[in-house]
Amino acid sequence: MTTGTVDDVTTGEPLIVLDGVNKYFGPLHVLQDVSLSVGRGEVVVVIGPSGSGKSTLCRAINRLEPISSGTITFDGTPLPAEGRALARLRSEVGMVFQSFNLFAHKTILENVTLGPIKVRKEKTADARERGLSLLDRVGIANQADKYPAQLSGGQQQRAAIARALAMQPKAMLFDEPTSALDPEMVGEVLEVMTSLAGEGMTMVVVTHEMGFARHAANRVIFMADGRLVEDAPPAEFFANPRSERAKDFLSKILTH
Amino acid sequence: MGEFFRVLTDNWTLYRDGFTNTVQLFLIAAVGSLVLGTLLGAMRVSPVPALRASGATYVNIVRNTPLTLVFAFLVFGVPKLDVNIDYFDSACIALTVYTAAFVCEVIRSGVNTVGTGQAEAARALGMTFAQVLTLIVLPQALRAMVPPMMSVFIAMLKNTTIAAGFSVLEAGAIPSYMSERGEPQFAVLLWITIGFLILILPLVALQRFLERKWRVAR
């Protein structure tokens, strides 16, 4: 690791830095002057009401959503424009989607090995070996030769996590990874994510799972109306939200 | 009935040469328009606005021009620019240029049947645009593209007859030769119709085969 001002012993120098980020969808101002830095090994959970810009924020980090103004820096490099440099950067950032997005025409193992083989130009045998061990790690090694449609939602999402991990990313982005799952399958996905967090993976997680935010996050970001309203350790945020907006949000979700 | 068969057997070389040229025109233009149309389709779904605009402009201009006019441009217009191409080559180019616009739209509609999440996931893995298209999107789009693509090619096979008006001896040119020989037009035309039906059968079979093949692949 290079030298730099280390402001937090547990997090180290920042890996992801957003500075004054604005994003418009037509007249809609979905990200309003958002600044945020995520340290190496840090797990940041982003919560907030729907339409608050959480997903857009998450997708902006690997430029699936281009921003209107401001800068986003990943590992010391500003996000490049569309092209090979951006593709290279994306290969270092794992992404897990709400709707899994496994490649429907490929088997689970092919899904996991396609990136390493085609993007990283790894040998097929090496990619297969690592792919199988990743599938084993997320508990679906016995599904390797099936097609995505033959798996349950929870299994598909775990396969999607394995697919992202197969690229050996420096950070992982989770865009509401459990929102499309049946309640009984949420646990198995969160379990994988928790163990990943425990191993020191840098993670940005957009979620409504407050339990995960409480026990796995280093920081909780609360967003509302495109603004970053609060940024605090989970214990502090859940016990003592400072803003009215966060108090209101928590009162609505925690009473049920 | 004997008279009907005599029309074919007496003029066999004319029918044979005409349909041979038709098949050659068709095969060359099919390959050409598939390549050009796929490139145009890729342009129309690319992230580069200038490419998308050029693709759309091509389709809008060529698709809305009568095929006879496209032929006329190539056969009468291009030689004025001191470029010499013979009639058969002109016909191949005209058919390719024209059909590519339709192939492009078939490709694009096929691509649109594949959910945006598939391409997003591929981009998130670090794939380039070409990889996203060839490894993820097009293989899943093929199934939806087969029926309209076959319609485009069947129409193109029949469109080859326009080349007769531009000095190419293909199936569409047979009637004028035959009327000079004083053959009964009804039998002449019926034999040409039968010829086209025979040529189209393999295309229909190919469509059935591909639809079945890609159905079990999922």
Image (cartoon, coloured by chain):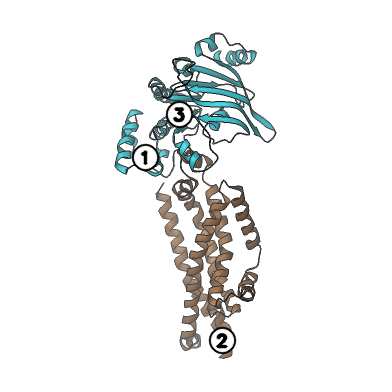
Chain colours: A cyan, B brown
Q: Which amino acid type is shown beneath numbered disc 2?
A: Tyr
Identify the image quadrant of the C terminus of chain A: top right
Q: Residue at x 53, y 51 (%)?
A: B110
The reply to whether discs 2 and 1 touch (Cβ–Cβ < 8 Å) is no
- Around disc 2, counting alpha carbons within 10 Å, would you say few (fewer than 14), some (14 to 19), or many (20 or more)? few
Residue labelled with disc 1: A113
Residue A141 as seen in the image, left or right of residue B87: left
Q: Chain of mark 2?
A: B
Work out how far the residue at label 3 is from the one at label 1, CA to CA, in angstroms.
17 Å
**Image-quadrant location for residue A228:** top right
Callouts 3 and 1 on one subunit: yes
Label 2 vs label 1, nearer the camera = 1
- For this orientation, the residue located farthest to the top is A239
* Name of the residue lying farthest toward the front: A3
- In the rendered structure, the answer to whether residue B168 lies left or right of residue A191 reads right
For label 2, the residue is B177
Q: Is B137 situated above or below B165?
A: above
**Visible residue check, residue B33:** yes
Residue at the spot of label 3:
A172
Front residue (pair A39, A214): A39
Q: CA distance from mark 3 to mark 2?
A: 72 Å
Please tell me which of labels 3 and 1 falls first in the chain.
1
Q: Secondary structure at mark 1?
A: helix
Instruction: Let me know if residue A208 appears in the view.
Output: no
